[in-house]
Image (spheres, helix red, strand yellow):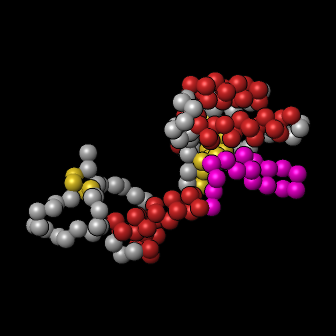
Amino acid sequence: MPNQQNRTGLGRPPKFQEPSSSITVTLPNRILENLEEIDEDRAKAIVKCVESVRALGAKARSRVELINISEDAAVLIIGHCPSLAQIPWLGLVEITPSRYLMTMPTGTPLSSLEVALLDLIETLPETGHPDRETLVEIRQQLSEHRRQDQVNTCEVFLLNPNIDDFVKS
């Protein structure tokens, strides 16, 4: 558990004007160099990065987006939705901070995903659950495009020696 910052007046003054904790974290050297370009103080640089990503996500992105990738193709991008982890065969590939592509095992029919989403939605309270809107919107997008015969699946090559870090299967 992180240590709470000393509030007794002893030691260095606090860096932030809100409750904070001291932690130890190991980062790649290139990230440390990048953080230094943002702020000489690593803690402040990390805070700036997180706040800018969160602000970008809140202002510029909806929970579910249809992103055109060519004249005749688009991909469904979803925001952070922990409830999707309850679908054991559904994978999530993080493409930018808190933005994911969904993956399914080859040959899995789209209807299986729709049914799994409906089952999941039924288990959540009708109000107050942060994932419910996202799940409903994903299901609506899939259903609408399926009815118009506008859904195609294809294989995407994911190249990374540590692919397990990116794909939950």
Which of the two residues, 108 or 136, is positioned nearer the viewer here?
A: 136
Q: Which residues are magenta?
A: 60-77
Q: Residue 44, how many percent across, how many down?
A: 36, 69
- Residue located 79% across and 50% down the image: 74
Indicate left or right for 42 with 163 as reference.
left
Instruction: Examine the image and state in which quarter residue 46 appears.
Output: bottom left
Residue that protrudes farthest toward the front in the picture:
127
Q: In the rendering, at what x and y percent does residue 134 appear?
A: 62, 41
- Whether residue 88 is visible here, answered yes or no, is no
> Does the rendering let one see residue 36?
yes
**Residue 135 among magenta residues:** no
- Horizontal and vertical percent for residue 59? 59, 61
Q: Is residue 69 magenta?
A: yes
Foreground of the two, 107 or 17: 17
Left or right of residue 1, residue 105 in this image: right
> Eyeballing the image, is 75 above or below 145?
below
